[in-house]
Image (tube, rainbow, N blue to C red):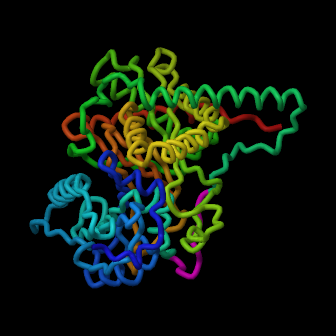
Amino acid sequence: MDNFEDATEPVSPSGRFFNTTVLCAYVFGFLESEVPIEFSQAKYLFEDVFLPVNPHFSSIMVRDEEGEMKWKRVEVKFEDHVKIPTFPENESLELYDQYFDDYVTKILMERTPQDKPLWEIHVIKYPTSNAAGTLIFKLHHALGDGYSLVGALLSCLQRADDPSLPLSFPSRKSSASSSPSKKGFFRLFSSTLFSFFNSISDFGWSIVKSSIVEDDETPIRSGEEGVESLPCVISNISFDLDQVKKIKSKLGVTVNDVITGAIFYGIRLYMQEIDNKAGKANSTGLVMLSTRNIGSYQSIQEMMKADSKSPWGNHISFLHVPIPKLSQASLSNPLEFVWKAQKIIKRKRKSFTVFLIEWLLDMELKLRGHEAVAKHIYGTLRNSSVVVSNLIGPIEPMALANHPVKGLYFTMTGGPESINIAVISYTKTLRITLKTQKGFIDEKKFKFCVVKAFEVISKAAMEIPNKIRG
C-alpha cells in the first residue's frame, strides 16, 4: 500500500486534467549549444540546477485513501531521467540532422512512466546543422503551462556576458500604445456594452465550436481519429526580429500581429497549393493564452508564493480565431492578412471571453470532474485546424553550465491537431516551430509557404512611405 506521509500537496485541477486517459500533454524545450556538450556537466545539471527548481520535479502523482490526487516526494535517479542517445558515427551533418529528427519524432510520441517524476532531459551530444549539441527538456503539462516550464528552464540559465546580471525580456506593450484615453460617459458606456455583447457572442461560439461544429477537413486538418498518437515532424523557421519590428512600425501593429498575419497567410497559401478550393474552407486557429496579468517572467521563488501575481501551474485559456480566407484583395495586398488578424485578435482580447472560458472549465471541473474537462479541451483542439502559442524569450545571449546557448525553441504534444505552431523570441531572432502530422502535412512545402508569406508581407510593408511628421 502507498505511503502517503510525504503526499501532502494536492495536485492542481489543471494538473489532473492534463494527465488523463483522454489527454496526456507535454511541453518540449530545446536548447541549442554553440559548443559540444560535455557529459560531465549532465549530472551537475541534473542534481544542482534542475531538480531544485520545483519540488514537483522530485514528485509523482498518487491517489490517497480518500481518492484525492496528491504530489508525493520520491527518490529521483539520474539514469531514469537523463537520456543520452547513441547515433552512428559519421562526418555528415546531414546524416546527423536525420538521426536527430528521427529521435525527436520518437520521443514526441512516448509517454513518461507514471511511477517516476514526469520529466526527462535528453542530451544530444552530436552536432547538427543548427548546433554543436542540443539539450531537450521533456516536461509533462501536469507540472505547469508553457509560462511556468519555460520560466523554470530560464531560471537554470545565466546571462552569457555577465552571470551576475538578470536576464531581461522585451516589453509586451505595443509601440503604438497611446496615453490613457479620455472618453465621455456615453462613449465609455457604449464601448463597455459593445465589449459585453462581443464577450457573450464569442463565449457562446467557443462553446459551440468546442462541442459541435468542426472545421472542414482540409490539407491542414486530416480529421483522423487519434492524431495525437501518430508520428509527427518538427521543423523550424527563423526570422530576423529587427525586420519584424520594422514591419510592425510601418503597419502600426504589434509583433504578434505581424507573425500571426504571416502564419495565417502562409497557411492559406499552402492550402491553395495542395487543393485550389481549400482557400475558401472554414478553418480556425486556436490561440493559446496565459491568463496571468503580468508582462514578463517572474523568478521561481515568486511563482511559488501563495500570493504570487504570477503563480506556478497551468493558467491558460484559448481563443478561436477564424483564419481569413484568400481573396483577390488579399492576394493583391497581403497586408490585409496582418490587419485582419490584428482586428480579430484585438476585438477578442478586449472581450472577457478568455476569462469566461477559464470560469467554464473551472465550473465543469467542480460539477463533472477532471476527465470531463479533459474531454472538453480535447474536443476544442480536435475541432480546430491549427494550434498557435507564443512566448517571449530573453534579449541577451544565455549560457547553461558554461555552454553558450545558440538557439531556443519549444513545442507541445498530446493534442489531436495536425499542425501545432509555437513561437518564441531569443536575442534578435524569432523562432517559429512547426509540429506537423507526418505523412499528411508536406512540412517542406508548408515551411516554404510560411517563409514566402513573411517575405511578401515584408516587401509590401517596406513599400509604404514613411509618415511625414509635423
Left or right, 3 with respect to 394, comes to: left
Residue 97 locus on image (x, y percent): 21, 57
Residue 124 locus on image (x, y percent): 24, 68
Residue drawn at 62 percent across, 38 percent down: 349
Which quarter of the rendered picture does the N terminus lie within?
bottom left
Name which quarter of the figure residue 98 lies in.
bottom left
Q: Which residues are magenta?
A: 161-170
Left or right, 297 with respect to 15, comes to: right
Of 282 and 373, the residue lying toward us: 373
Q: Residue furthest front?
A: 66
Name which quarter of the figure residue 179 lies in.
top right
Name which quarter of the figure residue 466 lies in.
top right
Residue drawn at 53 percent across, 26 percent down: 205
Residue 163 is a magenta residue: yes
Residue drawn at 51 percent across, 17 percent down: 329
Figure check: 173 above or below 444: below
Figure check: 117 above or below 22: below
Figure check: 302 above or below 238: below
Residue 153 is a magenta residue: no
Q: Residue furthest right?
A: 184
Residue 116 locus on image (x, y percent): 28, 70
- Kindly report the secondary structure that dominates the magenta region of the rendered protein: loop
Can residue 339 be seen here? The reply is: no
Which quarter of the rendered picture does the C terminus lie within?
top right
Left or right, 212 with respect to 112, comes to: right
Of 262 and 452, the residue lying toward us: 262
Residue 41 locus on image (x, y percent): 31, 82
Of 95 and 413, the residue lying toward us: 413
Can residue 248 be seen here? The reply is: yes
Residue drawn at 39 percent across, 26 percent down: 268
Q: How many marks?
A: 0
